[in-house]
């Protein structure tokens, strides 16, 4: 069982069953099991999740507001497929948000938050040792989100969560080589700088880190083919 990247109480106005379905779809996108451009037919989703098409429709509408699902008249729903221009805008937004958050933190990093982040990094290292790419992806995103919560605020964290999901689509489309999108060593250095109160150094490290991710993109690449929704949306 993988760690939950999403707060189960963050329903986005959905009923509990619908929120669970939304989180499963987000999980599949975050872990790159559901590639950009994948068709999401209502009837297939309803069968996969043993629910009604009306519930599926509400879920897809909610996810479209997060810009990870696209709804088109007469064509139905599909996973968003960012263009190179979209990708540059999203990655630039992450730089502004994350560099600014560590350079001008809203609050001091507590001992409890520090230990939580250290534990996440250690789990990320263990996933790397085991070549567990799914958990590496999830824990990488979790580190960035936990850091935003620790030194930022809930509004910043909510914005970043959406950007992390959209970044996952960008990486699925344009990653130049099979490399960990966020190096564990970078995470450890960023956390150490913040813990020592070296905000300018933390900002420099975060900028370098995010630019390295961006530098690993090749906008000429195409996404992998899609298999079945049941497989892609299965719990990890």
Image (tube, rainbow, N blue to C red):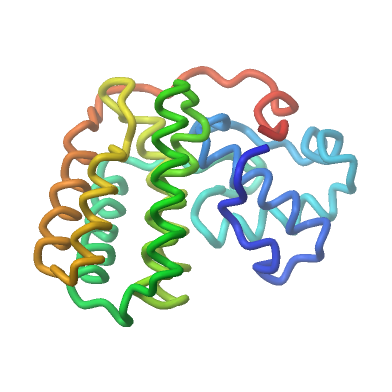
Frontmost residue, 159 versus 46:
159
Q: Which residue shows up at 31% across the image and 53% down it?
A: 90
Q: Give x and y (percent) for residue 89.
A: 26, 54
Q: Quadrant of residue 227?
A: top right
Q: Give x and y (percent) for residue 83.
A: 33, 40
Frontmost residue, 56 versus 24:
24
Q: Which residue shows up at 45% across the image and 37% down it?
A: 137
Q: Where the N terminus falls, by quadrant?
A: top right
Q: Is residue 12 above or below residue 127?
A: below
Q: Is residue 152 above or below residue 147?
A: below
Side of 78 where 93 appears, left or right: left
Q: Which residue shows up at 52% across the image and 36% down it?
A: 31
Side of 150 where 1 appears, left or right: right
Q: Is residue 73 above or below residue 196?
A: above
Frontmost residue, 126 versus 36:
126
Q: Quadrant of residue 228?
A: top right
Q: Where the C terminus falls, by quadrant?
A: top right
Q: Give x and y (percent) for residue 133.
A: 47, 27
Q: Give x and y (percent) for residue 167.
A: 38, 45
Side of 13 where 176 appears, left or right: left
């Amino acid at each position: 069982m993988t760690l939950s990247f999403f707060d189960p109480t963050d329903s986005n106005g959905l009923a509990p069953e619908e929120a669970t379905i939304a989180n499963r779809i987000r999980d599949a996108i975050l872990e790159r099991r559901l590639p950009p451009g994948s068709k999401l037919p209502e009837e297939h989703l309803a069968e996969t999740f043993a629910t009604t098409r009306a519930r599926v429709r509400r879920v897809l509408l909610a996810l479209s507001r997060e810009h990870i699902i696209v709804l088109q008249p007469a064509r139905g729903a599909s996973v968003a497929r960012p263009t190179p221009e979209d990708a540059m805008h999203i990655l630039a937004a992450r730089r502004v948000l994350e560099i600014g958050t560590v350079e001008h933190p809203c609050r001091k990093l507590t001992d409890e938050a520090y230990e939580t982040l250290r534990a996440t990094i250690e789990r990320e290292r263990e996933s790397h040792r085991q070549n567990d790419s799914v958990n590496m992806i999830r824990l990488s995103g979790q580190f960035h989100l936990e850091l935003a919560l620790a030194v930022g605020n809930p509004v910043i964290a909510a914005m970043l969560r959406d950007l992390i999901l959209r970044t996952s689509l960008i990486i699925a489309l344009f990653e130049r080589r099979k490399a960990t999108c966020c190096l564990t060593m970078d995470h450890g250095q960023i956390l150490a700088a913040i813990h020592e109160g070296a905000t300018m150094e933390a900002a420099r490290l975060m900028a370098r880190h995010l630019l390295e991710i961006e530098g690993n993109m090749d906008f000429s690449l195409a996404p992998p083919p899609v298999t079945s929704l049941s497989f892609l949306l299965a719990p990890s």
